[in-house]
Amino acid sequence: MQTELTDPFGRKIEYVRLSVTDRCDLRCFYCMPQGFRDFEEPEDWLTFAEIERVIRAFAELGVSRVRLTGGEPLVRKGIVELSQTLAGLPGIHDLSLSSNATRMDKYAADLRHAGIKRINVSLDSLRPEVFREITLGKLEKVINGLMAAKAAGFGPIKINMVMMKGLNDMEAEDMVEFCIEHDFTLRFIETMPMGDTGRNASNRYISLQTIEQRLAKRYALIPGMMPGGGPARYVQVAGTELRIGFITPISQHFCETCNRVRLSVDGTLYMCLGQEERYALRPLLRDGISDDELKQHIIRALALKPRNHDFSKKPEQLVRFMSMTGG
Ligand code: SAM
Ligand code: SF4
């Protein structure tokens, strides 16, 4: 039996982004519509036993890295127990989590004990009123969550900041200072046209080259590296430990080095954030397929992986919100 996953373009797949819920306690306007309630029904969520089975199959096919995401993963009940189970699977060497951190003060220490190694936290503004405008939430909760994560000993903690013209782009320098002070890594992200929400945010699109050029006037930026850096290109602020990553799906494609697939809460494997190719695993799991058959299906699914997204050429094509696929 095959022990490696390769797609039709020769890319080795070693990373699964696992959405444990499509629900969220925030409503970032570029991600989820304000009154949105059309969530997956609980009976359609993969159970923890089903998730474990699928991730075990991936691990046997050479996947070593898993990131828990959503929606907001910390709203799924039992997330600590699930983390512990996945961290203990043979072959899974790197279990990480993306969160908005509103509930992190409650969970940080337990998640760390459960085996989560690294966390990424969304933080688009340090100004309470701007934060509320973007997310409908309270900045204070996120800051408390971040401090709890720091106290629990997570490192590196990466801050993800979606850059939006005229809304928070003027805060880039403030965020740099905040991250230097707290020893966080900072990543700027370009808005992506995912679903109507993402497209609505497209008029706020700003190329990250503009931000980098502006920062270069104030800071000496030298080429930097970051383990597990994924699609981000990093620079380091000279004289500090701060690394800044630029995630530029729109202005500079990073598809040639794509190493991942996404598993949504309803058990659908998505081959690309920006395309429709998918493979439904839940009906197969509930039909009683064997572990070997499950692996064969995963291999078959990988054959569907497209070469790249078409965000720039066909921004209208994608109807899924980011929270549905697992960002
Ligand atoms: N709730 C968690 C969080 O906010 O980190 C995890 C899920 S969220 C969908 C993952 C990431 O996707 C966040 O960093 C968020 O900012 C980003 N995201 C969501 N919609 C986006 C869009 N249209 N364009 C760019 N980034 C987006
Ligand atoms: Fe929730 Fe994260 Fe989407 Fe914001 S980006 S609405 S925190 S899932």
Image: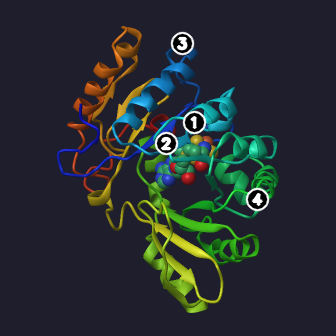
Locate residue 240: give its quadrant. Answer: bottom right
Depth check, mark 3 against mark 4: the one in front is 4
Left or right, 315 with respect to 224, comes to left
Residue under the point 57% across and 75% down: 243
Left or right, 262 with respect to 159, comes to left
Depth check, mark 1 against mark 4: the one in front is 1
Nearer to me, 79 or 313: 79
Q: CA distance from mark 3 to mark 4?
A: 36 Å
Depth check, mark 4 against mark 2: the one in front is 2
SS for dot 1: loop
Nearer to me, 277 or 104: 104
- Asked whether the residues under the numbered discs 4 and 2 touch, taking CB atoms below 8 Å apart as contact, a structural biologist would say no
Check disc 4 and give the amino acid type. Lys
Residue 192, relative to residue 296: is it above or below?
Answer: below
Which residue does the numbered mark 1 point to in the structure image?
88
Q: CA distance from mark 2 to mark 1?
A: 7 Å
Which residue does the numbered mark 2 point to in the structure image?
92
**Position in image of residue 178 (x %, y %):** 73, 72
Which residue does the numbered mark 4 point to in the structure image?
150
Which one is earlier in the sequence, the residue at label 1 or at label 4?
1
